[in-house]
Amino acid sequence: MLALVEPHYETTILRFRHLLKQHELCGQILDRVNNYLASRGIRICTGTFAAQLQESSRSRSH
């Protein structure tokens, strides 16, 4: 899918990423996103998001 992205979009995203790093905003943004998701009962951990969704849907169907 990345191959379908036009080069100028990749450059824009890369510049945005560099600005986030330069101003040390990556961690702050991630914290805000995680807090937002947590306030809605969603917790993301490496490799467990899909499993939690499956467990959640199973518990609702019973």
Image (cartoon, helix red, strand yellow):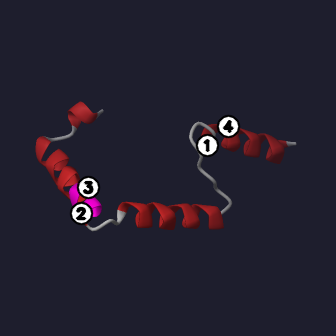
Q: Residue 38: give x, y in percent of width and height.
A: 63, 62
Q: Which of these two is toward me, 11 or 23?
A: 23
The residue under label 3 is which amino acid type? Answer: Arg
- Asked whether 36 falls inside the magenta stretch, the response is no
Residue carrying label 2: 22
Write the start and end of the magenta stretch as one range: 17-21
Instruction: Answer left or right for 60 relative to 1.
Output: right
Q: Residue 4: give x, y in percent of width and height.
A: 22, 34
Give the residue at the far left of this rendering: 8
Instruction: Answer left or right for 3 relative to 47.
Output: left
The residue under label 4 is which amino acid type? Answer: Ala
Give the Cα separation between the discs numbered 2 and 3: 9 Å
The residue under label 2 is which amino acid type? Answer: Gln
Residue 41 against residue 10 in the figure, above or below? below
Residue carrying label 4: 51
For the stretch drawn in magenta, what is the main secondary structure? helix
Q: Earlier in the sequence, mark 2 or mark 3?
A: 3
